[in-house]
Every structure is written in structure tokens, then in C-alpha cells.
Image (cartoon, rainbow, N blue to C red):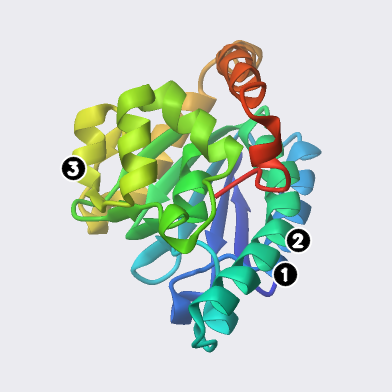
Amino acid sequence: MYQNFLVDRDDKIAVVTLNRPEKRNPINEEMLSEFEQIVMSLRDDASSRAVILTGTGNSFCAGADLSMVKRVTDPAERQRLFALARNRRARLIGRTFPLFENLEQVSIAAINGYAIGGGWGLALSCDFRLAVPGAQFWLPEVDLGVPLGIGTTSRLVSMIGIARAKEVIITGDRYTAEDLHSWGMINRLVVPEMLMETAHDLAKRLIAKNPRAVAGSKLSVNAIAAVAAREVTTVQPDLFIHTEEG
């Protein structure tokens, strides 16, 4: 049904798998359009109570698909093309990630490898994050000449605080799942062969609870975090025009 995703619904649990393993599941506009369709279908799916998001191969999501930009050798032209493509992606991400984040279903990111840029941002839009030891995370946006999008920025600040968020975003350093687990951003470290089983076990535990209480609690936490995010957007509004996400 989808070119870039596998979607499996079974026993109140929907498993959504990014499926471009030959390139480590990078994000392009076609993929974002499909993800928006999937999110809208989940929003209207009364039978699904939990969503597990993962990637095929050895990566969760390698961020933006830069294959076209990489073929350009001039640094200034590469930066210009990247910024143009990013602005188009940002409009889609700016609609889709918040919709996914605020689904009534609980969402679990099963991070099986690299989560880079927008891939890290996608994981942050989930309610729970499980990751294999050694999975790597980084944000290359500043090194590519653009600010990180406001959505990912606000989620980082709310999860790890201002000082550490600035370090992560501005340095572009790489971090492991173990680092993020020690910060409280990763809920659990899980060996690769147990990752999906553990994600399903967590999903089953969550859907056994009162659905209205779970959905209400989730949306209350998200609403409180959104207040802080709105305050951030008033600081320098021009900086974030068409850069909603990393």
C-alpha cells in the first residue's frame, strides 16, 4: 500500500516501519506525505490503541535524504539546495509530527540504530523510546548551515534542559543510546534481538489500562510541554520561518 513504509495492525497495536533500508531510512518529501496519510488513518482508527514506530535494517531513520545535495561539489550551492529542500520538508513535518505526537494512541519508538536529524526528531515525538545499545544520535543541521527546527528544539529543551540542548544542537556531537538513557531521554536499553518483543510487551501493558485515562494523561503532559514551546517561538520568530523541524 505504501512505498516507504510497512504498516501492520494486530490486536490493538499498529506497527509502522520506515522501509528504505538501502539508505538507512532517510526522510524525503514522498516519505513525509505517506507518513501524513498513515497518521491520519491512525487518528481515525478506533481499533488501534498503541503504535510502535521502527525502521528496517540497522537504522531507525538517517534524517533528511541528502542524496541530491551530495552530488553538488560547491559548498555554497550545496547549502542553498539543502535549505530549499529543507523548507519544503519542514512544512510537511510541521503538520505531521505534531499530529503524530498528539494521537490518542500511545506511541513507542523502537530505535534499532541510527537516529539522525529529523530521525531523532521523529523519535522525540513518540511517548516512549526504546533503543539498542550503541545506537547513535546526532543533529547535523548547524553544520549544514541551518538552525534546528523549532519542534525538535522545543522537545529537546523540555526533555534535557536548556544547557544540554544547546550543547547537542550547536556542537553537532554524536551521542549513543547509553548517553541518552543516562539523561532520561531513552526509557530503556534493549538488546537488538529483544527490541520488538519488548516494544510489544510495553504496548500490551499500556493498552490494558483505561484508554480514556491514558489518552487524557498523555495529552495533558503534551499540552504542558507545548506552553513552553510557544514561549520559545516568541523569542526570535523570524529565525524559525519554514524551519519547523530538524
Q: Is residue 180 above or below residue 64?
A: above
At label 3, which amino acid type do we have? Glu
Residue 173 x/y as whole percent: 27, 51
Instruction: Tell me what residue is drawn at x 27 percent, y 36 percent.
Output: 188
Q: Secondary structure at mark 2?
A: helix
Q: Which residue is mark 3?
A: 178
Q: Residue 229's spot in the image, x, y percent?
A: 59, 22
Choose between 33 and 89: the one closer to the eye. 89
Quadrant of the drawing holding the N terminus: bottom right
Instruction: Name the kind of residue labelled 2 in the image.
Output: Ser
Give the mark, 1 or 3, whose residue is nearer the N terminus: 1
**What residue is shown with label 2?**
33
Residue of label 1: 30
Q: Is residue 143 left or right of residue 87?
A: left
Q: CA distance from mark 1 to mark 2?
A: 5 Å
Residue type, mark 1 in image? Glu
How far apart marks 1 and 3 lie (CA) works out to 32 Å
Q: Is residue 220 visible?
A: yes
State the count of labels. 3
Q: Are marks 1 and 2 in contact (CB under 8 Å)?
A: yes
Horizontal arrangement in the rendering, residue 156 relative to residue 14 (left or right): left
